[in-house]
Image (spheres, rainbow, N blue to C red):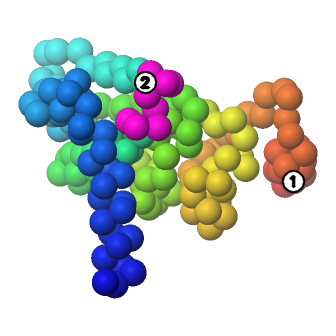
Amino acid sequence: GSHNAETILATLQGYLRALRDQRVAATTSVRELDWERVFTPPADQPGAVVVIELDVASLEKQRPLVNLLFLQLFRAACKVAADSPGCRLPRPACVYLDDFPAAVGRIPACGQYFNTLRSRDVRLTVAAQSTKQLEQFFGAGEAEAVAAAFSTTVFLPSVDDYDAERASRMSSR
């Protein structure tokens, strides 16, 4: 009867709901992707390219799994880097996340991962509809940590008032 138990149950049901889809259950029933192998290919082989494309119509149902997938990617990159000389990946990695907040959702400690990954030789390119969208998904404090992970920010027209003000503040530094 505790509020915490009800919250945990509701959250867990949200994550497990996607597994009721037979195609999702079939895909997740076998381990086909080993992130550690992706980050450490044999020296005589080229690096790997992993493309994940999402069906926008199914995104709401798939978001918890996509979130988990990227959380595993970030954890594996940190682990492989920690086990490598200089705490860096054996080969640099580039991760492109288009419409990141809407597609992936809130990753716990995302700002910390983004800032840590940069020093581990993971290059992140993240696109969002607006910086306000980061606050909607992460909350103000975490959104600032996420935004701080990027050394370059590009604003494309049309820019809302919030982003115009942010761009103005950033350009006056």
Instruction: Give above or below for 165 relative to 145.
Output: above
Residue 88 visible in the shown view = no
Relative side of 132 to 33, left or right = right
Q: What stretch is highlighted in magenta?
A: 55-62
Q: Which residue lies furthest to the left in this view?
A: 30
Q: Which quadrant of the view contains residue 65? A: top left
Mark 1 highlights which residue? 169
- x and y percentages locating residue 139 in the rendered image: 61, 62
Pointer 2: residues within 10 angstroms few (<14), some, or many (20+)?
Answer: few
Mark 2 highlights which residue? 54
Quadrant in which the C terminus is drawn: bottom right
Relative side of 40 to 160, left or right = left
Which is nearer the N-term, disc 2 or disc 1? Answer: 2
> Does the magenta segment cover residue 77?
no
Q: Which residue is drawn at 60% across and 45% down?
A: 150
- x and y percentages locating residue 89 in the rendered image: 28, 40
Relative side of 43 to 7, left or right = left
Tag of residue 59 = none
Mark 2: secondary structure: loop
Q: Nearer the viewer, residue 100 or 49?
A: 100
Q: In 3D space, how far apart are the residues under numbered discs 2 and 1 (Cα atoms)?
A: 35 Å
Instruction: Give above or below for 112 relative to 86.
Output: below
> Pointer 2 and pointer 1: residues touching (CB < 8 Å)?
no
Amino acid identity at mark 2? Leu
Q: Residue at x 17, y 51 (%)?
A: 83
Q: Which residue is drawn at 43% across and 28% down?
A: 58
Q: Which of 110 and 67 is in front in this view?
A: 67
Q: Which quadrant of the view contains residue 161? A: top right
Amino acid identity at mark 1? Arg
Q: Which quadrant of the view contains residue 90? A: top left
